[in-house]
Image (cartoon, grey):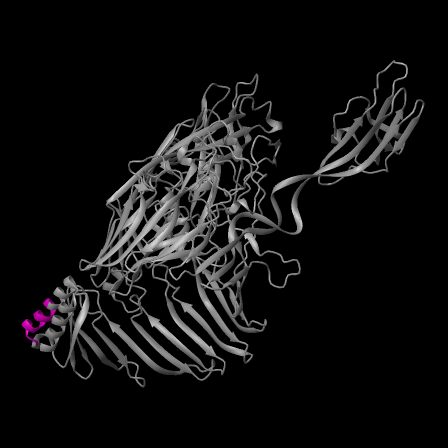
Amino acid sequence: MVLGQASIGGGATNDIQKIFPATPETYSMFKAGDFPVDYRTGKLNVSVPLYEIKTRYGVTIPIGLTYNTGGIKVDEMSGIAGLGWSLAIPNTISVEMHGKNDLDSNVWFPKAPYYYTTQEVALFPQEDIDKLSHVMNGNLDTEPDIYHYNLPTISGSFIRDSNGNFRTIPYEDVKISYANDEFTVIDPKGIVYTLGWGNMNKSVSYNVISSEVYFSSFVLKKIKFPNNEEVSFTYGKSMSYSHMTHSFSDIYVDPSNTIACPGTAKKINNKTKNTYTEALLTEVSHDGEKVNLNYTNTIQGIQGRKDLDGTVNTFALSGLTATYQGKEVKKMTLEHDYFVSSGTEDSYKKYRLKLNKIKNMLDNTEHSFEYNEAYLPYLSSTSQDLWGYCNGYYGIPIDGNNSQKLIPNLKYVNKDYTEGGNRDVNDNASQAYILKKIVYPTKGSSSFTYENNTIWETLLISREESFALGKASGRVETYGDGVDAESPEFYMNDASNPSYHVAWTNGCDNASGQIGTTDAHGWFEEYNPVTGWQTVKLFAKTIAPFIVTPSMHNKDYKKRVRVNVISGNSPCAASINAYVTKTVTSEPKSNVLVGGLRIKAIDDFDGQTNYTKRTFDYSKPDDPDHQTSGRLASPLEFLKRHYSVGHPSGVYVDDICENYVLTADQAASSGLSGKDVVAYSYVTENTLGKGKKVYQFPSHDFHLNITQVNAGWNPYLFLDKNLQSEKSYSVTGELLQEKKYEYELNQMKNALSTDQPQGVGNALALSTSFSFYELNNNTMQRQVKVRVNNSYNIQSGKWLLTKSTDKNYLNGILTSETVNSYSLSDINKPINLMKSETRFFDGSASEISYQYAHEKNNQKLINANIIATPLESSSIQKRNVSDPSGTTISKTETKYDDPANLLPTSVLSFDLQNSQAATTEVTYDKYDAKGNLQQYTTKEGIPTVIIWGYESILPIAKIVGAKLSDINQSFIDSIVIASQTDGSQGTIASEERMLNALDRV
């Protein structure tokens, strides 16, 4: 008996792990929002802005559509904006669930998981027995979920440790808490984000009986700024639909275990019904400003989304309307159609929602879009490469009878798999559905040229190639003729242990005992230094290829093949051919195509002329072979070690069999687990008329052989992805400027995690998957043993920019060099930039130092997490770097002394001769309830009053020389009321009345 969190049948547990797909809209947000546009991946996020909200606190909230140009996957479903598009608002936490939902489950992230595989469970201390029992029964989760947050001022990822504290990746000085089904996130500037339930996914597996309901995203409900300004988000509509996905597992036995592990081999087809419920944003409000997002259930005159399995509650984004004080200031509409493929009975799988146009209804302009529609694979087709992109090869609908087609046909360990599918890359088909052209309101356009990602030499899908070793042939034409022929000598001793074959072709009768029969024979021979040539195999009429196994011959002996043909009554011929078949895993000196797309060129049309504006080259600069700088960025894994209970024949003691399992899951092709395929260390961008720039990024080289067991690497590595250098060249190729950046990895904050493994400073916790096995021993007692399916370090840290240099080659000297230092002395304090020293070409230097809430002991700001705002700064000028103290040229401090709010109260400047002597430059005397400054006083003692109108959003009057208490309230009321009226009416007459009211004041 086998026990586990997600058992399948009687032989395997959660080592064949369930992959939980996110809703399509969550995936769109993750794909476009979590991965910034950068040259390192070759992807551009094309964006169409719809509207933006500008807050008085200085934060802008953009609302628009973005498109990810990295390619469309075969199993990728359309979000509300259209295939490849996402509604781009920084308003989500997307959940990448592993194991069970961490927010609803008890968790335990063991620091030494392999310790529990050393003996049976009952022999551990009781505390460990209790934990393992809860894991075995599905009541304790050992795999941390990964949360990806994308908010207006902060983004990144985090996990929840076993004490309920949230740890960010990379480390950021943010406060995260979860209570009453809501996340509260406070950024280092004290901005408070509140997020509640968003998209939900219910997964029900049938063949492997299991179900899971969880929220795949949390959505932003409210933003509150330190000045009491607020932005609220309303989700007044939802839609739901279902989609069936399939997975396949082929468990096969190691040949050495066939006796000890009988009956453990099996094939498992599993189907999972995923029911998605998506929360749709319908309104964003800020002071008197409202943005309404509109949706439609009818597209091209037909009710319901044709591309989703559901017609009643399925919608597409149809437009956006923005109003201020009730007056319409922006109105955008979206026009949709469908991509249509063929070849499946599931009607919704034939369609993908297509965004055709975005129209601005107030100025009568539009953006329109064109796509690559040469290949249109239907949803859930087998026509996909290793990474899930279309490969154009014959595809059939994936169902419970053929999901093995997701496994590539390859030679794996102890298994030559031929029941799977062709998952090679096709550079034309992989561009299916991709955006290829945008036509702008000006009628100009941009066209995009793509190419597949590449890596150097390595073939992930190997191929078989045969090479001739020796051949002999003979032919006779007339009665009585005879022919003897032999090949040159050869050896069969290749150290790579390839497959050796001898093929025999015989067109003669070889009818023994008949007069006049034409006979042919072939010999495969080896030369023994003592006895001479000896026959390894004699061939007569049989023509099937002969496989030469190592036990049949001596690899040190030379070989030959020979043929003899004797004519009886008719012409005939025969031949014998020895050859070797090798598995080719590399293309020497070649760039090899892999999945996903990168941008190659952007062509612009200005209304009259087409021209190539920008081109991109991803090879190593000046490499004679034009070698790509691409390296695989994400692991792929099909073959794993599999454990099951074996019952050896005639033995009463069970044992754990270590076999193999080939697995594939559609959810892996469309879920959040799909990361960047390739990362490039060099990218050259050529811009028409401006020369070129060469960008350099860190190179991380991971070897991947998917035919080997557990071939992938840790998916939670915390890698340096920062720009290392940027070189600018003129049109003629002359180097003009070079910028270099040096980063230092700091991981001291990882120790704050309760689950950090001992001695593993780069990790926050381990993510471990266990399986449990119940065995009978010879006393008929049952034992439970544990195996670790996989265990990964979830890494984090912070890459700190420690040095940047800027060299201008026009004069051939260093322009500037900046060295930064950070606050790293206290693990419980934030990591802030403390000092930045810039050295110039003439030898002089300037230095800026900062102090923050912790350095100034401002507990009020610390409690509010306003810990990244400098409260004091001082600037020093040095004659040269050896100048010990330099000359202080400025020193200022901002005070936050009012306990009633989080706003500044005064600004001090310090005497340059006496750094302890401070002068108050300005005092902020009074704020209103919305955090607007109403009165300040300069150091000369002159007060200034600012009067706010239009619902206290805009300043309408500034009065110098008077205090607010000196001004008659009726005068203030008159202009404020006039502004309110003007804001609501928005007419020329109302504006004139407003100006007249100001004149009277």
Q: Quadrant of the C terminus?
A: bottom left
Q: Nearer the viewer, residue 619 or 498?
A: 619
Magenta: main secondary structure equals: helix
> Would you identify the image quadrant in which residue 466 lies?
top right
Task: Say left or right for 365 vs 988.
Answer: right
Number of marks present in the image shown: 0
Compared to residue 762, the image places residue 973 above or below, namely below
Image height of 363 relative to 83, above or below: below
Which one is in front, 317 or 881? 317
Q: How far across and down, in percent of the image, does residue 198 sit?
A: 29, 44
Residue 760 spot, x, y in % from top left: 46, 51
Front one among 760 and 734:
734
Segment tinted magenta in the rendering: 967-977
Quadrant placement of the N terminus: top left
In this view of the protein, can residue 144 be seen by the observer?
A: no
> Residue 875: which quarter of the image?
bottom left
Question: In the drawing, does residue 766 fall left or right of residue 420?
Answer: left
Query: Could you say where residue 177 lies in the image, as x and y percent from the top left?
Result: 28, 50
Query: Residue 549 is drawn in which quadrant?
Result: top right
Q: Is residue 148 visible?
A: yes
Q: Give the residue at the far bottom of this rendering.
A: 913
> Foreground: 463 or 473?
473
Residue 93 on image: x %, y %: 33, 49
Q: Is residue 974 magenta?
A: yes
